[in-house]
Image (tube, rainbow, N blue to C red):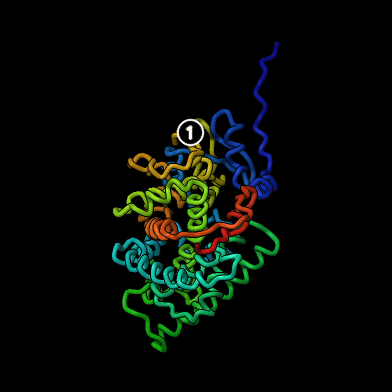
């Protein structure tokens, strides 16, 4: 009797399923996989998806994975920008990344940005008391606050009208990168508009037609020289300025989720409000980034033939690291679907937290602005907990089929 052989793996294309199911797509596949490895195709490319702390280390090893060819043009044309630091590897990446680290990892600089955000926030709170009966939309307000504050900090002078446009454009870039149709077209137009405006500003700074404070992001990016010793092209300098401004504006997503959490679990409001040390607010910020959906996964390309837990990964395979699924896996989190800002008392739990990527931000592709995200979000959590607000009836559901997602209403409220 002949020996039966296991049928070969069928690499079914999952692109349409991803677009349909959003954040649930990869976790659903992970649950259905007996070995915790997902084998599929995206846009026709053979794809292997991984999850877990060990997978994070494997994925962020440059001897295994490169990012240069992993980001498709539609994502570059909307979210990151063509030629951005995210597309580089090796020495070119480290030299460009050092520019960001000098700006975004400096403790005094982070504190200064927080102060700008709190100033703009408190100015807005003063206006909210005069808002119409239906109140204000927190997401829209926070995006505008963050856009004005980060431009104050970077040295990009804006009128109130320009600030409103920048906020809308940064939101559009994030909102439209993972979809087709009108959202994607708005994202492309938004990026083109802001790249043109900031490229012109860089030229004016270089030609001394406009001044930029010493050490501010505008001045640093305008004067930066890449690994080959050349200045960045003005458009590329604009891309990298936007890679400071846009992620800061994107904290509006997390701030809106934080308001949703305070509304859904009001028992946390009092302790956060009375937290003089700020430790609970920081834990709350971490838990928002773990619990709520933002980045579903990150991708890279296998630089050579690899093996992962017995799985052959040929050179050129697209590798996905499952972020959203890892944050809701009981293997690494106690009661993962319970919102608990007290869970971050150990370095081990923080090691499992990768909403903005993993690895060493100085050497790899982990977001260098993560400290800024946590600091600003913790500050906004404290401010939100201190407000006496009314929350009218509205649709606060968060659709997982949409990437990126948000409470449908944007979280409307009015001051009590």
| As drawn, 408 above or below 146 | above
On the image, the x and y values in percent for residue 415 come to: 50, 64
On the image, the x and y values in percent for residue 213 come to: 34, 79
Q: Quadrant of the N terminus?
A: top right
> Of all residues shown, which one is farthest toward the front?
416
Residue placed most toward the observer, 305 or 59:
59
Taking the spot 41% from the left edge, 86% from the top edge, the residue there is 210
Q: Is residue 62 shown to the viewer in this render?
A: no
Residue placed most toward the observer, 185 or 148:
148
Quarter where residue 140 is shown: bottom right
Q: Is residue 327 shown to the viewer in this render?
A: yes
The kind of secondary structure element at disc 1 is loop
Give left or right: position of 251 versus 187.
left
- What residue sits right under mark 1 in the picture? 330
On the image, the x and y values in percent for residue 228 come to: 39, 69
| As drawn, 331 above or below 390 | above
């Amino acid at each position: 009797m002949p020996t039966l052989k296991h049928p070969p793996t069928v690499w079914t294309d999952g692109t349409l399923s991803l677009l349909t199911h959003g954040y649930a797509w990869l976790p659903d596949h992970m649950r259905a996989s007996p070995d915790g490895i997902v084998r599929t195709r995206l846009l026709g490319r053979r794809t292997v998806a991984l999850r877990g702390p060990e997978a994070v280390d494997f994925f962020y090893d440059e001897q295994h994975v490169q990012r240069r060819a992993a980001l498709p043009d539609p994502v570059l044309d909307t979210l990151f920008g063509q030629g951005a630091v995210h597309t580089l590897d090796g020495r070119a990446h480290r030299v460009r990344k050092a520019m960001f680290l000098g700006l975004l990892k400096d403790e005094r600089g982070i504190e200064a940005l927080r102060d700008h955000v709190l100033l703009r926030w408190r100015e807005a709170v003063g206006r909210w008391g005069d808002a119409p009966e239906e109140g204000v939309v927190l997401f829209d307000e926070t995006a505008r606050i963050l856009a004005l504050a980060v431009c104050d900090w970077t040295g990009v002078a804006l009128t109130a009208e320009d600030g409103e446009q920048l906020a809308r454009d940064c939101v559009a870039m994030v909102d439209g990168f993972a979809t087709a149709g009108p959202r994607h077209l708005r994202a492309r137009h938004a990026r083109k508009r802001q790249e043109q405006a900031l490229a012109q500003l860089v030229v004016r700074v270089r030609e001394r037609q406009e001044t930029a404070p010493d050490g501010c992001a505008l001045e640093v990016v305008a004067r930066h020289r890449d690994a080959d010793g050349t200045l960045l092209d003005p458009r590329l300098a604009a891309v990298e300025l936007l890679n400071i401004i846009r992620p800061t504006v994107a904290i509006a997503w997390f701030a809106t989720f934080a308001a949703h959490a305070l509304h859904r679990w009001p028992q946390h409001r009092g302790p956060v409000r009375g937290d003089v040390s700020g430790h609970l607010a920081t834990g709350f910020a971490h838990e928002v980034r773990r619990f709520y959906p933002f980045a579903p996964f990150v991708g890279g390309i296998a630089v050579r033939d690899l093996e992962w837990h017995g799985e052959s990964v040929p050179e050129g395979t697209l590798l996905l690291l499952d972020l959203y699924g890892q944050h809701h896996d009981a293997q690494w989190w106690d009661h993962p679907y319970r919102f608990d800002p007290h869970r971050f008392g150990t370095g081990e739990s923080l090691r499992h937290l990768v909403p903005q990527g993993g690895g060493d931000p100085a050497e790899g592709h982990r977001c260098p602005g993560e400290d800024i995200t946590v600091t600003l979000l913790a500050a906004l959590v404290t401010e939100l907990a201190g407000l006496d607000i009314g929350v009218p009836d509205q649709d606060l559901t968060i659709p997982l089929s949409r990437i990126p997602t948000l409470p449908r209403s944007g979280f409307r409220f009015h001051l009590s």
